[in-house]
């Protein structure tokens, strides 16, 4: 039987977050609800999770030596990666030295890099994916486009939230897409993946939880992205029974291969009954923020239960729900939200303001949440909330 002692005491449990954005903030809150001490680490001061953590550090998440020094100083019971760009080779070493990396260091290492996870999915597990080619330089990139054809999607092998991603629609887009990929990678310029453009009816995130008693699936989440960055999501996404069964089978294969405990965001394209694997994240997913209003246990609560080895006997779904990201453009270190009196006067709605300290060019700063009698009603509510919300920069 696991003991959860008092924080700061010998029997107290400690978790260290590698990445402290809005998703990490919700994980930190859920950890604290169960009496876990939280240490937040990220590359900038006053990151969202730092604002609710017991302690925080600011370092480059790619600096393996500094990360190692902090982990040895703090000696956490759980190391919880919350972003892609981390010194994953260091996490692999630390796991061998006895530290508990969530879900596993290998899972974090493979999914941080699109090449690792694509080769695992397509070449080792035989999952259906789009056609793809990797390119380490401009010449290989041109050759990859020649093989894949136009239109195609270009992504850095290391990026998140759509950074560095673009679509090559014509020959004129080739050089521009290369420049975007080199500027947008989380670890700087480097290797890219060129993918065939998939014609699909819709795309989903199938949140999959590996826990002490097995694997559980949440209702599929539909979502809309712009330039690879999440804008809206809704739950449940209507699917045929056949497509849902295929999606769950695919999600179980990839998460079993990655191993460990926690929640995984498995992204897939669906056309009719055909399901095509896209990506997987071994952590809560941005499109899954809708679960903060759609379920009794959000994706963050489920992640924490799984990490701590606690049971997940059921996941109660409250009804059709939707989320809409509030993306602020421009440059500001003092974003202000107003008219919340009208925004939250709409029944069955919520809002989360992330508390990010500044925005440059564009940044997701908040999320709007609503529940309705149908997906359409829930979507209408978040659209109305967005219209009523006033943002000053």
Image (spheres, helix red, strand yellow):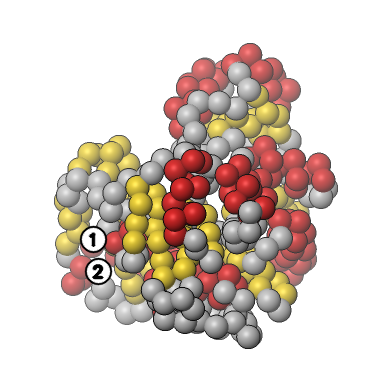
Residue located at (35% from left, 47% from top)? 58
Residue 232 showing in the rendered view: no
Front residue of this view, candidates 390 and 258? 258
Residue named by callout 1: 389
Residue located at (41% from left, 77% from top)? 9
Element carrying mark 2:
helix
Front residue of this view, candidates 390 and 56? 56
In this image, 317 relative to 322: left or right?
right
Front residue of this view, candidates 73 and 220? 73
Quarter-wise, where is residue 190 in the image? top right
Residue located at (57% from left, 74% from top)? 308
Q: CA distance from mark 2 to mark 1?
A: 6 Å
The residue sitting at the top extreme is 139
Q: Give residue 121's mark.
A: none
Residue located at (41% from left, 40% from top)? 60
The crowd level at tag 1 (other Cα within 10 Å; few <14, some 14-19, many 20+) is some
């Amino acid at each position: 039987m696991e003991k959860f002692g008092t924080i700061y005491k010998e029997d107290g449990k400690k978790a260290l977050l590698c990445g402290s954005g809005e998703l990490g903030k919700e994980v930190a809150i859920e950890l604290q609800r169960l009496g876990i001490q939280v240490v937040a680490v990220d590359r900038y001061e006053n990151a969202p999770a730092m604002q609710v953590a017991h302690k925080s550090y600011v370092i480059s998440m790619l600096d393996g030596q500094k990360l190692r020094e902090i982990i040895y100083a703090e000696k956490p019971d759980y190391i919880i990666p919350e972003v892609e760009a981390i010194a994953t080779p260091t996490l692999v070493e630390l796991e061998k030295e006895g530290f508990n990396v969530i879900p596993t260091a290998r899972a974090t290492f493979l999914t941080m890099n699109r090449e690792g996870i694509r080769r695992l999915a397509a070449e080792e597990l035989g999952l259906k994916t789009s056609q793809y080619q990797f390119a380490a330089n401009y010449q290989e990139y041109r050759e990859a486009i020649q093989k894949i054809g136009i239109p195609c999607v270009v992504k850095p092998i290391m990026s998140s939230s759509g950074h560095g991603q673009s679509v090559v629609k014509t020959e004129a887009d080739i050089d521009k897409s290369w420049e975007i990929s080199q500027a947008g990678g989380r670890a700087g310029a480097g290797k890219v993946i060129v993918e065939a453009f998939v014609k699909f009816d819709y795309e989903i995130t199938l949140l999959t939880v590996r826990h002490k008693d097995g694997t559980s699936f949440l209702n599929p989440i539909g979502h809309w992205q712009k330039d690879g960055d999440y804008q809206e999501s809704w739950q449940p996404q209507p699917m045929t029974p056949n497509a849902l069964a295929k999606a769950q089978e695919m999600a179980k294969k990839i998460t079993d291969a990655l191993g460990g405990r926690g929640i995984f965001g498995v992204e897939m394209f669906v056309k009719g009954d055909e399901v095509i694997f896209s990506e997987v994240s071994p952590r809560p997913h941005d499109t899954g923020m809708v679960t903060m209003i759609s379920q009794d246990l959000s994706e963050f609560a489920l992640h924490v239960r799984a990490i701590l080895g606690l049971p997940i006997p059921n996941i109660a779904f409250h009804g059709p729900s939707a989320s809409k990201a509030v993306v602020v453009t421009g440059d500001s270190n003092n974003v202000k939200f107003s008219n919340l009196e009208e925004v939250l006067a709409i029944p069955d709605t919520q809002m989360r303001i992330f508390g990010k300290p500044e925005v440059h060019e564009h940044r997701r700063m908040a999320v709007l949440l609503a529940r309705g009698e149908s997906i359409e009603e829930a979507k209408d509510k978040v659209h109305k909330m967005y219209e009523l919300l006033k943002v000053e920069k």
